[in-house]
Amino acid sequence: MSAADGRVDPVRVVLGSVAALSRALTVEQRRPFEGRVLTGSQLSALFFLARTPSGLTPGRLAELLTVSAGAVTQLVDALRADGHIDIRVNPADARSRIIVLSRASRDEVEHFEGATTERLRPKFAALTPAELTTLADLMNRVTMETKE
């Protein structure tokens, strides 16, 4: 991205806004799962899995978290040991695995998201429902997009 394409300043504004929202989320991140301490990467993994009920391959999860395959293996092992996730055979390729949220974690993520949404809802009060939908679509496009 060159400065000449007009994207540098808007990207900086977006990054600053995301950082501010991230700080607001961090306040709650360690408390949602029956008082168990979760790292930022673990919490992010659970949210990505919640958004993908069919599950994610370890490689795709590593991509979304921008971590190495080794790091995602450690993360998955810890989440599995705590009962947050289940590992299944990939129906599209029996040689690979799919990571899914456990039923208990799905309920906990939904509860945490609901409470966090209510707490942060005032920050979005200046947006119309249509603008908020557009923002959500754009953020999903930026964060869930496959690397090129």
Image: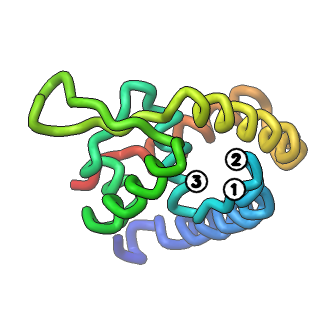
Residue identifier under label 2: 33
Say which mark, if any, is on residue 36. Answer: 1
In percent of width and height, residue 3 lies at 42, 77
Task: Specify which label sits upstream in the sequence, 2 or 3.
Answer: 2
Q: Which residue type does callout 1 highlight?
A: Arg
Question: For the residue carrying disc 2, how many other residues have a C-alpha within 10 Å: few (<14), some (14-19), or many (20+)?
Answer: some
Disc 3 residue type? Leu
- Disc number for residue 43: 3
106 and 48: which one is in front?
106
Q: Which x, y percent locates residue 123?
A: 85, 49
Q: Nearer the viewer, residue 21 or 56?
A: 56
Question: Is 44 left, or right, of 78 in this rendering?
Answer: right
Contact, mark 1 vs mark 3 (Cβ under 8 Å): no
Residue at left offset 82%, top offset 38%: 115
CB of mark 2 within 8 Å of CB of mark 1? yes
On screen, residue 50 versus residue 148, left or right, reads right
- Mark 1: few/some/many CA within 10 Å (<14, 14-19, 20+): few
Residue drawn where x is 79% and y is 31% of the image: 128
Q: Residue 13's quadrant in the figure?
A: bottom right
Image quadrant in which the C terminus is located: bottom left
Q: Which mark is residue 58?
A: none
At label 2, which amino acid type do we have? Answer: Phe
Residue pictured at 42% horizontal, 60% vertical: 75
Mark 2 and mark 1: span between their CA atoms? Answer: 5 Å
